[in-house]
Image (spheres, rainbow, N blue to C red):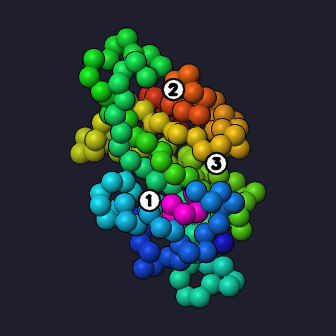
Amino acid sequence: MPTVEFLPLDPRTVNVRTFDCGKEAINVYLRRYAAKNMALNLNRTFVLPYTAEDSTGKPNVAAYYTLAHQTLVREELPDPSRLPRYPVPVILLAQLGIGRRVHRQGLGAKTLVTALRHAYQIASNPKGLPAMGVVLDVLDQDALDFYQSFDFFLPLTDNPMKLFVPMASLETL
């Protein structure tokens, strides 16, 4: 059973090799690139550990998400009228994956809400970094259907696979 909270990824303490969400790009990112990108200060990955019956000492990963900073030109945002003409900061929800072993337990929504709350905390903390909202580059139609089941995502561009949620919408989340 998964633990209660997401923790920063530390591959010395969790087994990322067994993670399988059914989407190879999401699996490969966690297994090969997440820790390397964190070491380079490019982003942060957070994992929800759980101990499976076949565990070999380290907990497996039930779910994970990755946050990074990004900038967008104002014309890309849904309501650019009050923004400066230079690029504005946003937080990118770069990765989100739920392991197959724990599918259908509500972890998709829990992981998404946790990631969005975390992004809001980063942007609203006086010691954090400000951001206009959260951007998602959606992997495929299954992921798009999942995200669209939440009412707060807006299309970012004409591309339906790019979504945006303003920080103000996350205040009550």
| Amino acid marked by disc 1 | Thr
> How would you rate the neighbour count of disc 3 (Cα within 10 Å): few for under 14, some for 14-19, many for 20 or more?
some
Q: Is residue 160 left or right of residue 172?
A: right
Q: Nearer the viewer, residue 96 or 50?
A: 96
Is residue 51 depicted above or below 142 in this figure?
below
The residue range painted magenta reads 26-30
Residue bearing the label numbered 2: 156
Gap in angstroms between the C-alphas marked 1 and 2? 23 Å
Residue bearing the label numbered 3: 109
Displayed quadrant of residue 49: bottom right
**Pointer 1 or 2: first along the chain:** 1
Spot occupied by residue 87 in the image (x, y as percentages of width and height): 30, 27
User: Which secondary structure lies at badge 2?
Assistant: loop
| Amino acid marked by disc 3 | Ala
Is residue 44 depicted above or below 12 in this figure?
above
Residue bearing the label numbered 1: 45
Q: Nearer the viewer, mark 3 or mark 1?
A: 1
